[in-house]
Amino acid sequence: MPSAIIVKKTDGKPGKVYYPLHKVSLPPQTPTADQVVIRMSAAALNHRDLFIRQHLYPGISFSTPMLADGCGVVSAAGANAKQWIGKRVVLNPGTGWKDSPEGPEEGQYAIVGGTKFNPAGTLAESMLFDAGECEEAPEHLSDVEAAALPLAGLTGWRALMTKSGNAKPGHNVLVTGIGGGVAIMVLLFGAAAGCNVYVTSSSPEKLKKAQELGAKGGVNYREKDWASKLESLLPEKRPFLDTIIDGAGGDIIKVGNGLLKQGGVIVSYGMTLGPKADFLMQAVLKNVEVRGSTMGSRKEFGDMVQFVREKKLKPIVSRAVKGLDLHGIDGLFEDMKKGSQFGKLVVQINENSSKL
């Protein structure tokens, strides 16, 4: 019987409780006609997984395996999916959104891992999944790298490529809070698309690593004059930002407004500093747009994976642990709590074909 990791319910208020991890055995996995059984190679953490453990996420399940990111090899398939057997795949981390650029079509959009809305989760030795939600993993990626791609890659892809409208050669892109999985993927996508990508962080080490990955420059957002310093880095012929891709919120509209061009775009994929951000009259007068952005559609997921394949991009892995070891996985969650990671935190479950 394959094993999986779930969270175990304990008493406590949202934000005060911290659900412990618990290993369980899964029932037999028999695929329907359109399903596959995947022997999981690796799975990766996202901030939503920490929020689940802290009871800060809706619809928490205490029986669904954790995590939405994963890579594995198809070991069995239903009658309509036999062509997938033996293929190494990455999994679309959300189901119920086909191809609408506006947002999920009618029905329930459900993210994989740890909730009542979707029965699948990637932190398991094997899992059942809809074959139509699989993509072949890019050949140049190890299992650990491939597992780090789906959710962060899809979120970053939609934010930059779909919502910003500024993924163009020579355009200036600011990515705030470099170090997390989404921000790094936006940097990689932007640089590969020919953009001038700039970053912020409070860590000099992270700023240096970002420049090694293709950022044109970076500034420490804890410094009061960081906006002026960033402005001085911009090209003389294009001394403004075309877009800001932000996951923090806070005062980004106030500060960013002075850096953006007329009609510039701020794309928000999260608000880690708080659930709101003020929209100022100065931004109205400058025709600045603020656009919310979530994960993405099945079409965007396929487009993103193909771009990664063509450009030979590699997600950055901060640290990986081997096996469904509760202590080791807890250590990854501690890294996330501290914000010390640069890149993704990954669990290598089985060694199918990993290079890491």
Image: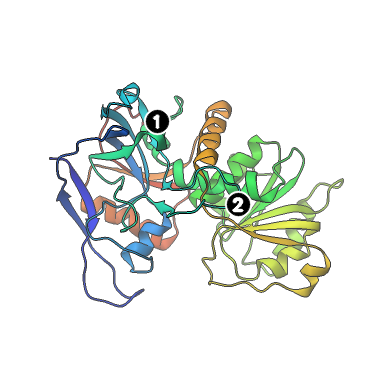
**255 horizontally vs 71: left or right:** right
Mark 2 vs mark 1: which is more N-terminal? 2
Q: What mark, if any, has residue 102 been given in the picture?
A: 2
- The answer, for residue 200, to whether it is visible in the render is yes
Kindly identify the amino acid type of the residue bearing the numbered disc 2: Glu
Query: Quick check: can you spot residue 225?
Result: no
- Give the x, y percent position of residue 79: 28, 26
Q: Mark 1 highlights which residue? A: 142
Q: Residues within 10 Å of mark 2 (few under 14, many from 20)?
A: few
Q: Is residue 55 above or below residue 317?
A: below
Q: Indicate left or right for 79 with 166 as reference.
A: left
Q: Quadrant of the N terminus?
A: top left
Q: Mark 1 packing: few (<14 Cα in 10 Å), some, or many (20+)?
A: many
Q: Considering the numbered disc 1 on the image, is that residue within a helix, a strand or a loop?
A: loop
Q: Specify the quadrant of the image occupied by residue 244.
A: bottom right
Amino acid at the residue labelled 1: Ser
